[in-house]
């Protein structure tokens, strides 16, 4: 199948898988907690978004050259994705932290004012996801991961 011969696509997909997988041991080293849920979550070190777009862009540079319009499109796409990861998505995560705290505080307030029916707290409220975006260093190391994967692919494997 021709799709399995598309090295830029394969490099980008591998970069995503590698970046997601490596989050688990990094998190374990920092917290001493094993969290396999990080394999499918957003946010964290390194950024799999950055790894994917930089692996793709680097692979396109190898295939089509730095002068190609395809490289230009991919490079701009990578910049936009990484900017979004550190800006909008990161700030949305920070807002979710504050909203979750406000919800918790409101819950205490309601409990103090009324005889709240005894329900399971999980069924009362669902928390918003707080790990949506990336810190700049997470994007940076994700980008380095993607570039390294494409360089290794084109210089060692191929």
Image (tube, helix red, strand yellow):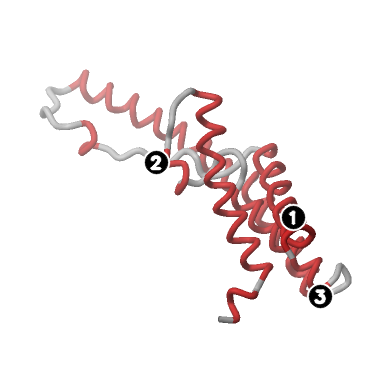
Q: Is residue 156 above or below residue 115?
A: below
How far apart marks 2 and 3 lie (CA) works out to: 40 Å
Pointer 3 or 1: first along the chain = 3
Q: Mark number for residue 41? A: none
Q: Which of marks 3 and 1 is in front?
A: 1
Classify mark 3: helix, strand or loop: helix
Q: In which quarter of the image is the C terminus?
A: bottom right
Give left or right: position of 12 versus 33.
right
- Residue at 85% across, 70% down: 65
The residue nearer to you, when weighing 118 against 50, is: 50
Q: Mark number for residue 152? A: 1
Classify mark 1: helix, strand or loop: helix
Q: Residue furthest front?
A: 157
How far apart marks 1 and 2 lie (CA) works out to: 38 Å
Q: Name the residue under label 2.
A: 128
Residue 121 picture location, percent across and down: 22, 31
Q: Quadrant of residue 128?
A: top left
Q: Are marks 3 and 1 in contact (CB under 8 Å)?
A: no
- Residue at 21% across, 18% down: 112
Pointer 1 or 2: first along the chain = 2
């Amino acid at each position: 199948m021709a799709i399995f011969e598309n090295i830029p696509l394969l490099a980008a997909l591998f970069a995503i898988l590698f970046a997601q997988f490596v989050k688990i041991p990094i998190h374990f080293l920092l917290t001493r907690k094993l969290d396999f849920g990080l394999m499918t979550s957003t946010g964290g070190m390194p950024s799999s978004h950055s790894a994917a777009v930089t692996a793709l862009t680097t692979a396109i540079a190898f295939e089509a050259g730095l002068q190609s319009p395809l490289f230009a499109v991919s490079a701009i796409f990578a910049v936009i994705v990484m900017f979004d990861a550190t800006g909008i998505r990161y700030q949305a995560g920070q807002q979710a932290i504050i909203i979750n705290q406000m919800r918790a505080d409101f819950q205490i307030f309601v409990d103090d004012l009324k005889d709240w029916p005894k329900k399971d707290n999980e069924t009362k409220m669902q928390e918003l996801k707080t790990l949506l975006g990336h810190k700049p260093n997470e994007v940076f190391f994700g980008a380095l991961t993607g570039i390294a994967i494409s360089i290794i692919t084109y210089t060692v494997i191929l």
